[in-house]
Image (spheres, grey):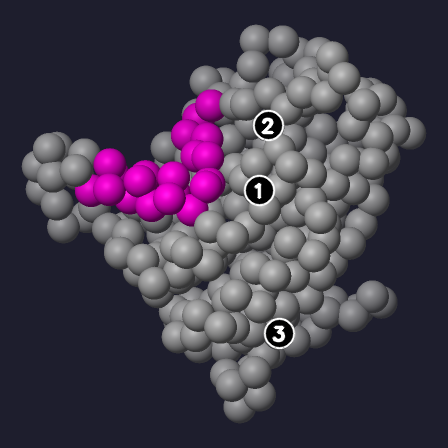
Amino acid sequence: MLYGITKGKYRYQVESLKLKFKDLPQAFNGYKIIQISDIHAGSFESIDQVAKGVAMINDQNPDIVVFTSDLVNSNKNEIDPYIETFAKIKAKDGVYAILGNHDYYGISSRSSEQKQQTYWDDFFSKFKAMGFQLLNNEHAFIEKANERIALVGVENWGAGNWFPKRGDLDKALPNNNKDFKVLLSHDPAHWDKQAIDHPEHIHLTLSGHTHGFQFGINLLWFKWSPAQYRYPHWLGLYEKKEQFLYVNRGFGFLVFPGRVGMWPEITVLELEKA
């Protein structure tokens, strides 16, 4: 526990895997997606340690970087000391982000609609300052050699009644069911409840949220955490109906000021034409 508090919370690890798809556009064979999630900037106390993780992201030479939300704990200003650090993330096709449940908590004390809008405008400007393009129930096309894939981002959609449910998958999806689709959705429960059985085939969903409970055992042959008793899909790769879900265990930490066994993660996903 002492190691987790003093060292483990910044012990960033790169998890690499290759995913094969029969209908991946040929131009995207070998395409490298870096996923990070759950920064929770309000918990950090070392810019240098965070910068170490950012350097590890850039070392992977990504085609694109996606952030599957929870930038802060409860207030937009928590990210301010780290904006310059995260702005150093570089990817050929840009950095994209969505909102998670913690990103909404800062508006709870703002009673009027005008004050809430002012809060959001300032918060969104911080994403822009870092070079993160927000996908709020919308999509963006990534194009290569006259072919494309659709990157789809939804706002938070939480299974629990206490989590905001602002995600609108129908609104976010492109009007073309032939596009290869990568969905960014913070809570993996969204995959179970909506994405899997959606009329549009969603090839890959990237989520976070669980943190692996920041405590557990994560070996190739054995994985355990209290997270598995709450979340059916809590860590790593899952497949169903020729659709993949990957659950990242998070870049930062929350409540418990450390990590034991469930070290912070930088995910490298390489797409391959089957």
Q: CA distance from mark 1 to mark 2?
A: 10 Å
Amino acid carrying label 3: it is Arg
Residue nearest the observer in this picture, 11 or 257:
11
Mark 2: give few (<14), some (14-19) or many (20+) Cα within 10 Å. Answer: many
Q: Which residue is found at the position 14% from the left and 50% from the top?
A: 109
The mark that comes first in sequence, 2 or 3, is: 3
Amino acid carrying label 1: it is Val
User: Magenta segment, which residues?
Assistant: 119-138
Query: Do we see residue 54 in this rendering?
Result: yes
Q: Which residue is found at the position 39% from the left and 60% from the top?
A: 82
Mark 1: give few (<14), some (14-19) or many (20+) Cα within 10 Å. Answer: many
SS label for mark 2: strand
In x, y percent, where is residue 94? 57, 36
The mark that comes first in sequence, 1 or 2, is: 1
Q: Which mark is residue 11?
A: 3
Against 187, residue 169 (above or below) is above
Q: Which mark is residue 151?
A: 2
Q: CA distance from mark 1 to mark 3?
A: 20 Å
Against 144, residue 216 (above or below) is below
Q: Which residue is mark 1?
A: 66
